[in-house]
Image (spheres, rainbow, N blue to C red):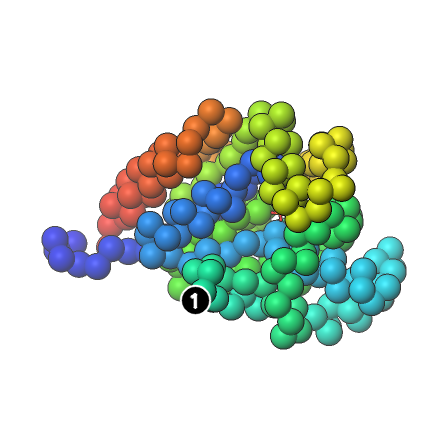
Amino acid sequence: MSAHAPLRKIIITIDGWSSCGKSTLAKQLAGALGYIYIDSGAMYRAITLYFLRNHVDWTKLRAVEEALRNIAIEFIFNPNSGQSETFLNGENVEYVIRDMVVAEKVSEVAAIKAVRDFAVSQQQAMGKGKGIVMDGRDIGTVVFPRAELKIFMTADNAVRVERRFKELYAKNPNLTIEEIKANLEMRDYIDSHREASPLRQAEDAFVLDNSNLTMKEQLDIALRWARERIKGIVT
Ligand code: CDP
């Protein structure tokens, strides 16, 4: 490889427990490397929002399959916020999918195999050109099992609850810390115990516990791993 050859692009996956800062790190990494960031959880949240709004009985496979045929999810870059935002059938739902009403049902919906097949095939298509950072629960294990860099994030429970509380309280001051805690615990339980691609650490993942790390420290660690992997690929 010549000294001036463009760097090969890689796929970076970030999996882990609810609310441990995966999307923050994924956005930081994508920004630093000039990669695309994809929030796979936003897809499950958008599907859940559609099911709730349209009273889809997701215990019935026929109803789920029929509903999925009517769902189109896109990520569109907003130059004002500098972020890509989630669109459901042409409507910007980036804000509403973060609501507690969605968070209460999303893990139940995300455990349905037909829903996962629908989301995973789209996620895999988005990674075709590489140069992507995707965060979720099964990205390093199922979506991109051959990704060049896999990160598994964790953080202390109390730290995660506190972070999510601060984030959601700004939107809804009626929320209590107990509700947030119960929601995170419930989602982690369902996500790690479901039959279809449960949350688990890929064998070749690097573990990053960010309980006591600043945003800069966590980015420095992950960037070092990413640069090693990028350099390590011989063209
Ligand atoms: O941001 P937070 O960690 O709270 O969750 P999220 O990434 O927005 O994901 C919401 C939910 O979608 C998770 O609790 C999982 O039930 C589901 N999910 C999944 O099953 N597989 C993924 N790859 C991403 C999310």
The quarter of the picture where residue 121 lies is bottom right
Q: Is residue 214 above or below residue 8?
A: above
Say how many tags the image has.
1
Return the x and y of residue 169 as percentages of the image width and height.
66, 41
Residue that extends furthest to the left in the rendered view of this protein: 3
Q: Nearer the viewer, residue 211 or 148?
A: 211
Q: Is mark 1 within 8 Å of ligand 1?
A: no
Please give left or right for residue 235 compared with residue 129 in the image: left
Mark 1 lies on residue: 79
Q: Is residue 103 visible?
A: no
Return the x and y of residue 222 as percentages of the image width and height.
37, 38
Q: Amino acid at mark 1?
A: Pro
Question: Quarter of the image containing the C terminus?
Answer: bottom left
Question: Quarter of the image containing the N terminus?
Answer: bottom left
Return the x and y of residue 173 as percentages of the image width and height.
71, 42
Q: Is residue 27 above or below residue 82?
A: above
Q: Which residue shows up at 54% across the image and 54% down it?
A: 39
Q: Is residue 176 above or below residue 54?
A: above
The quarter of the picture where residue 231 lies is top left
Q: Which residue shows up at 51% across the image and 68% down it?
A: 76
The quarter of the picture where residue 68 lies is bottom right
Q: Is residue 157 visible?
A: yes
Mark 1 residue element: loop
Q: Residues within 10 Å of mark 1 (few under 14, many from 20)?
A: few
Return the x and y of residue 134 as percentages of the image width and height.
49, 52
Please give left or right for residue 74 compared with residue 48 in the image: left
Q: Which residue shows up at 42% across the image and 31% down it?
A: 214
Q: Nearer the viewer, residue 124 or 234?
A: 124
Q: Which residue shows up at 58% across the image and 63% down it?
A: 86
